[in-house]
């Protein structure tokens, strides 16, 4: 993976941040898109101090024009696109507003489409490459109170299969990862907002839903992302990988 160009969305936090660090530490040129100015700038500086090649592209994946503009900062071809940025929402149909519904789809579904569309010419210029989308176990199992979020992840799964089929002849592989609960600011923010004062109790409850008895770490997700995106994963396309401490496979 030495000197390969990698584009990661949502790289300023959680799983995306672990991916930025992993790919950069392997000698890749990493570009990451994020809306978080403070954390994005901080990460770029930290990686530069280690002598690694990381560039923060500040902006939102929700706008195709913006993604198209940001992607021009990548000189030449692109080897790997990782569509990781995503936002969550808690609620059933009755407490999901039209605005919530639109916001979730705008980022989690249209944002992913925007990045794939903008990246395809550079992946083709490269003679092929890898697209990896962040899905979730919520795409294929009913998780309580995650109506809009789960639908966006269902769309991610079908987008992955469709893109994998349409671009297989161009040498472009497309896969997705479906994590169970991973301990990131995504989870901490959810607990602080929805269970103030009961964060520890709820954290332990969420951790226990994985048969393995804990949440995943962002680094564990980044390791699998690296394997799939590298030549070692060259025979993999059109696949969805559960990485969930046994949540899907060991249902009781
Ligand atoms: N943490 C989990 O338990 C878990 C489980 C399954 C799937 N996932 C998925 O993994 C991905 C990453 O999750 P995380 O837990 O690391 O989240 P996180 O909230 O820690 O990080 C998400 C990053 O995406 C960025 N972002 C949000 N909207 C954006 C936009 N419009 N444009 C550009 N950047 C934007 C945020 O600024 C943030 O830096 C998401 O797609 C999420 O749905 C997470």
Image (cartoon, grey):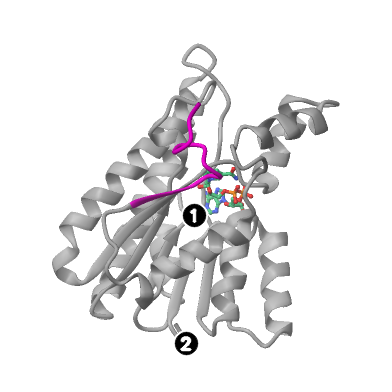
Going 25% across and 79% down the picture, which residue do you hit? 125
**To which quarter of the image does residue 220 belong?**
bottom right
The spot of residue 36 in percent (x, y) is: 65, 56
- Say above or below: 58 vs 141: below
Going 67% across and 60% down the picture, which residue do you hit? 37
Residue 116 covered by magenta stretch: no
Going 68% across and 82% down the picture, which residue do you hit? 48
Residue 2 image label: 2
Name the quarter where the N terminus is drawn. bottom left
Residue 84 image label: 1
The spot of residue 67 in percent (x, y) is: 42, 60
Q: CA distance from mark 2 to mark 1?
A: 22 Å
Q: Nearer the viewer, residue 182 or 51?
A: 182
For the record, the magenta segment spans 240-252
Count the numbered circles shown. Answer: 2
Going 25% across and 74% down the picture, which residue do you hit? 128
Left or right? Give the position of 82 relative to 56. left
Residue 243 covered by magenta stretch: yes
Specify whether tag 1 is near ligand 1 (CB below 8 Å): yes
Q: Nearer the viewer, mark 2 or mark 1?
A: 2
The spot of residue 47 in percent (x, y) is: 68, 78
The spot of residue 113 in percent (x, y) is: 34, 51
Kindly state the secondary structure of the residue where label 1 is placed. loop
- Say above or below: 125 vs 251: below
Residue 159 image label: none
């Amino acid at each position: 993976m030495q000197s390969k160009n990698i584009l990661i969305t949502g790289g300023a936090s959680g799983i995306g941040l672990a991916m930025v660090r992993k790919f950069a530490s392997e000698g890749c040129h990493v570009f990451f898109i994020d809306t978080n100015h403070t954390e994005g700038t901080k990460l770029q500086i930290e990686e530069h101090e280690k002598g690694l090649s990381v560039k923060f592209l500040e902006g939102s994946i929700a706008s195709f024009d913006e993604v198209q503009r940001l992607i021009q900062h990548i000189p030449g071809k692109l080897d790997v696109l990782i569509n990781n940025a995503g936002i969550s929402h808690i609620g059933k149909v009755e407490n999901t507003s039209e605005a919530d519904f639109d916001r979730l789809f705008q980022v989690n579904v249209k944002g992913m489409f925007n990045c794939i569309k903008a990246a395809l010419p550079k992946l083709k210029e490269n003679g092929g490459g890898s697209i990896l989308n962040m899905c979730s176990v919520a795409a294929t199992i009913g998780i309580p109170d995650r109506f809009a979020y789960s639908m966006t992840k269902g769309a991610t799964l079908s987008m992955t299969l469709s893109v994998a089929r349409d671009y297989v002849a161009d040498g472009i592989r497309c896969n997705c990862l479906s994590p169970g609960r991973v301990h990131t600011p995504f989870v901490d923010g959810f607990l602080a907002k929805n269970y103030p004062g009961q964060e520890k109790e709820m954290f332990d409850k969420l951790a226990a839903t994985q048969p393995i008895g804990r949440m995943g770490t962002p680094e564990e997700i980044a390791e699998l992302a690296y394997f799939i995106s590298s030549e070692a994963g060259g025979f993999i396309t059109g696949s969805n990988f559960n990485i969930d401490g046994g949540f899907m496979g060991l249902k009781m």
